[in-house]
Image (spheres, coloured by chain):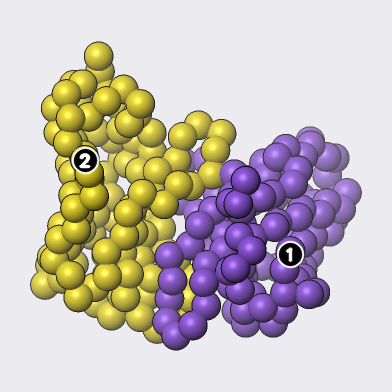
């Protein structure tokens, strides 16, 4: 089946690194994504990684993919108060069309 | 603005009424998707189009829901005889086509409240 799990809350101090973790079940997933959602807004595609990659870095964001454990993480360096939001882990399953399966989201609180 | 555009942003209506939402995708994207998001949850897939063809529908899309993309550009999502349980954020996304999945870009959604 297709399922994405992530912890519900994370609290960090401004300037620290944040690490948001996610596990997924579909070993044939092609893309894995991180989306950010601020209150009242839609989802912003932050970054994504293709399933044949282990790591992707984009400015303050680092994505790590462990295919063996079906584990995805997002590290935000030098976390700022503007990073406070809900972060969704998502996957494109390898079979069953082109829909994206989302986790329930991790709410990141950044304390000044 | 070249992102995904949704209209209206908010819709309040009485139970039993019909509502229609519109989505304008990113212009070069030929795939268009509809999702529903309830409070505290991630988006759930409803349906998607490749050009004007509706290729997949979720079991969440009851017979009161219908989606169209008549010319392969904008899309509409209609809900007939709305119920309290239809209250949610309805999100539209678009992506490039071609072989395999593609990263999807989302609009700001339409928030539906049923009185």
Q: Residue at x 42, y 82 (%)?
A: B100
Task: State the mark number for residue B75.
Answer: 1
Q: Residue at x 77, y 70 (%)?
A: B68
- Side of B52 relative to B106 (left or right): right
Which residue is outermost to the right? B17
Q: Position of residue B20 (x, y in %)?
A: 81, 54
Q: Quadrant of residue B88?
A: top right
Few, some or many residues within 10 Å of mark 1 (<14, 14–19, 20+): many
- Side of A19 relative to B91 (left or right): left
Q: Quadrant of residue B67?
A: bottom right
**Pick the front one: B78 or B102:** B102
| Figure check: A38 above or below A35 | above
- Side of A14 relative to A103 (left or right): left
Subunit bearing disc 1: B
Subunit bearing disc 2: A
Q: Position of residue B49 (x, y in %)?
A: 64, 75
Q: Badges 1 and 2: C-beta atoms under 8 Å apart?
A: no
Chain with colour yellow in the figure: A
Task: State the mark number for residue A60.
Answer: 2
Q: Residue at x 55, y 49 (%)?
A: B37
Q: Residue at x 70, y 57 (%)?
A: B24
Regarding residue A84, the answer to whether it shows in the image is yes
Q: Quadrant of the C terminus of chain A?
A: top left
According to the rendering, which colour does chain B have? purple
The lab-note entry on whether marks 1 and 2 share a chain reads no
Few, some or many residues within 10 Å of mark 2 (<14, 14–19, 20+): few
């Amino acid at each position: 089946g297709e399922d994405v799990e992530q912890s519900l809350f994370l609290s960090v101090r401004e300037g620290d690194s944040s690490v948001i973790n996610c596990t997924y079940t579909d070993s044939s997933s092609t893309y894995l994504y991180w989306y950010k959602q601020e209150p009242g807004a839609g989802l912003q595609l932050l970054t994504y990684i293709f399933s044949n990659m282990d790591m992707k870095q984009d400015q303050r964001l680092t994505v790590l993919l462990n295919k063996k454990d079906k584990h995805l993480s997002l590290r935000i360096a030098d976390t700022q108060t503007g990073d406070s939001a809900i972060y969704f882990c998502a996957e494109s399953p390898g079979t069953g069309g082109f829909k994206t399966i989302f986790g329930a989201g991790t709410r990141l609180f950044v304390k000044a | 603005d070249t992102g995904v555009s949704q209209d209206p942003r908010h819709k309040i209506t009485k139970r039993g009424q019909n509502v229609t939402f519109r989505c304008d995708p990113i212009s070069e994207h030929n795939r268009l998707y509809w999702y529903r998001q309830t409070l505290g949850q991630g988006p759930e897939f409803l349906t998607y189009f490749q050009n004007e063809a509706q290729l997949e529908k979720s079991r969440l899309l009851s017979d009161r829901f219908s989606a169209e993309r008549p010319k392969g550009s904008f899309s509409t999502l209609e809900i007939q005889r709305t119920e309290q349980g239809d209250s949610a954020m309805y999100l539209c996304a678009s992506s490039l086509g071609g072989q395999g999945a593609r990263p999807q870009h989302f609009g700001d959604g339409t928030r539906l409240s049923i009185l």
